């Protein structure tokens, strides 16, 4: 559920921020927004993948680090 919520929050952020940046006509601001949106997309997709695998990858990593 966390991955899906991350994607929804990212989309809501884009819906609000993109029109504001486009009205400002500031190229550096547009580039920063593009990087931020891209990073959120990658993190959100990673969250969805972890959720789809049932957290088994994360559990294996935690166990490999010596935690019960």
Image: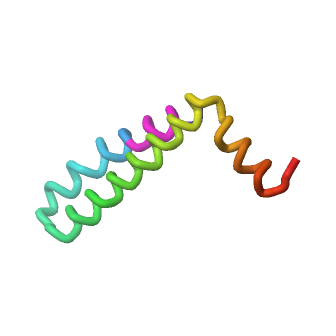
Q: How many marks?
A: 0
Q: As drawn, is 62 to the left or to the right of 51? A: right
Q: Residue furthest bottom?
A: 28
What secondary structure predominates along the stretch shown in magenta? helix
Q: Position of residue 30 (x, y in %)?
A: 20, 62
Q: In the displayed structure, would residue 7 be above or below residue 35?
A: above
Which corner quadrant holds the N terminus?
Answer: top right
Q: Is residue 57 magenta?
A: no
Which one is in front, 53 or 34?
Answer: 53
Which one is in front, 51 or 56?
Answer: 56
Q: Position of residue 24 (x, y in %)?
A: 16, 62
Q: As drawn, is 7 to the left or to the right of 53? A: left
Q: In the displayed structure, would residue 66 be above or below residue 45?
A: below
Q: Quadrant of residue 66?
A: bottom right
Question: Residue at the location (66% across, 35% down)?
Answer: 55
Q: Position of residue 12 (x, y in %)?
A: 37, 40
Q: In the displayed structure, would residue 54 be above or below residue 41?
A: above
| Display coloring | rainbow
Which one is in front, 61 or 30?
Answer: 61
Q: Is residue 8 magenta?
A: yes
Q: As drawn, is 40 to the left or to the right of 68? A: left
Q: Quadrant of residue 26?
A: bottom left
Question: Residue at the location (41% across, 50% down)?
Answer: 40
Question: Residue at the location (31% across, 46% down)?
Answer: 14
Q: Which residues are magenta?
A: 3-10
Question: Residue at the location (53% across, 41% down)?
Answer: 47
């Amino acid at each position: 559920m966390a991955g899906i919520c991350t994607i929804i929050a990212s989309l809501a952020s884009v819906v609000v921020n993109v029109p504001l940046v486009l009205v400002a006509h500031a190229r550096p601001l547009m580039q920063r927004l593009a990087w931020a949106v891209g990073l959120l997309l990658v993190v959100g997709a990673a969250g969805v993948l972890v959720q789809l695998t049932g957290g088994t990858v994360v559990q294996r990593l935690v166990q490999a680090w010596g935690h019960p």
